[in-house]
């Protein structure tokens, strides 16, 4: 059974790993989360659990999870990229 990682346990290492899986820059994470680029740089530079307000951590987590990251805690903190299978092709308007 997989266990979800508590938002307060998210580390800078998990944020960097999430960005790597998504191939996102710090700027892309800033845009997606609404958190300033200097704040993201500061948080990622410090090892361990993020030293930030819970609202900041929640915004980062929401942005990453919306992009397909799942934070886990089965044998320790971790993450994985969820790739959703698309059963429906996007409508390109060609049928109109």
Image (tube, rainbow, N blue to C red):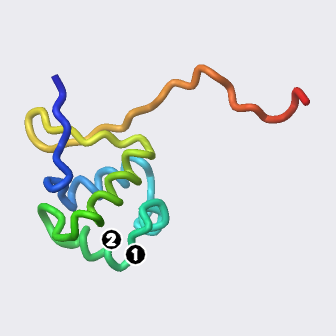
Q: CA distance from mark 1 to mark 2?
A: 6 Å
Asked if residue 14 is positioned above or below residue 69 in the image, the reply reads below
Q: Quadrant of the N terminus?
A: top left
**What residue is rendered at 70% in x and 31% in y?**
90
Residue lying furthest front in this view? 55
**Label tally:** 2
Asked if residue 32 is positioned above or below residue 65 in the image, the reply reads below
Element type where label 1 sits in the image: loop
**What residue is rendered at 16% in x and 32% in y?**
3
Pointer 2: residues within 10 angstroms few (<14), some, or many (20+)?
A: many
The reply, left or right, for residue 46 in relation to residue 61 is left
The reply, left or right, for residue 5 in relation to residue 39 is left
Residue 2 image-quadrant placement? top left
Pointer 1: residues within 10 angstroms few (<14), some, or many (20+)?
A: some
Which one is in front, 66 or 16?
Answer: 66
**What residue is rendered at 44% in x and 63% in y?**
25
Which one is in front, 92 or 19?
Answer: 92
Position in image of residue 94 (x %, y %): 87, 31
Position in image of residue 23 (x %, y %): 44, 52
Position in image of residue 84 (x %, y %): 47, 29
Q: Are marks 1 and 2 in contact (CB under 8 Å)?
A: yes
Asked if residue 68 is positioned above or below residue 87 in the image, the reply reads below
Element type where label 2 sits in the image: helix
**Mark sitting on residue 36:** 1
**Mark sitting on residue 64:** none
Asked if residue 64 is positioned above or below residue 40 in the image, the reply reads above
Position in image of residue 71 (x %, y %): 25, 42
The reply, left or right, for residue 34 in relation to residue 59 is right
Q: Quadrant of the C terminus?
A: top right
* Residue, disc 2: 40
């Amino acid at each position: 059974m997989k266990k979800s990682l508590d938002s307060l346990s998210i580390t800078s290492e998990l944020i960097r790993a999430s960005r790597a899986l998504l191939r996102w820059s710090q700027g892309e994470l800033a845009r997606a989360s609404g958190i300033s680029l200097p704040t993201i740089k500061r948080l990622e530079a410090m090892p361990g659990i993020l030293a930030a307000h819970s609202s900041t951590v929640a915004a980062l987590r929401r942005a990453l999870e919306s992009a397909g990251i799942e934070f886990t805690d089965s044998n320790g903190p971790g993450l994985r990229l969820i790739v959703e299978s698309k059963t429906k092709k996007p409508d390109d308007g060609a049928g109109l």
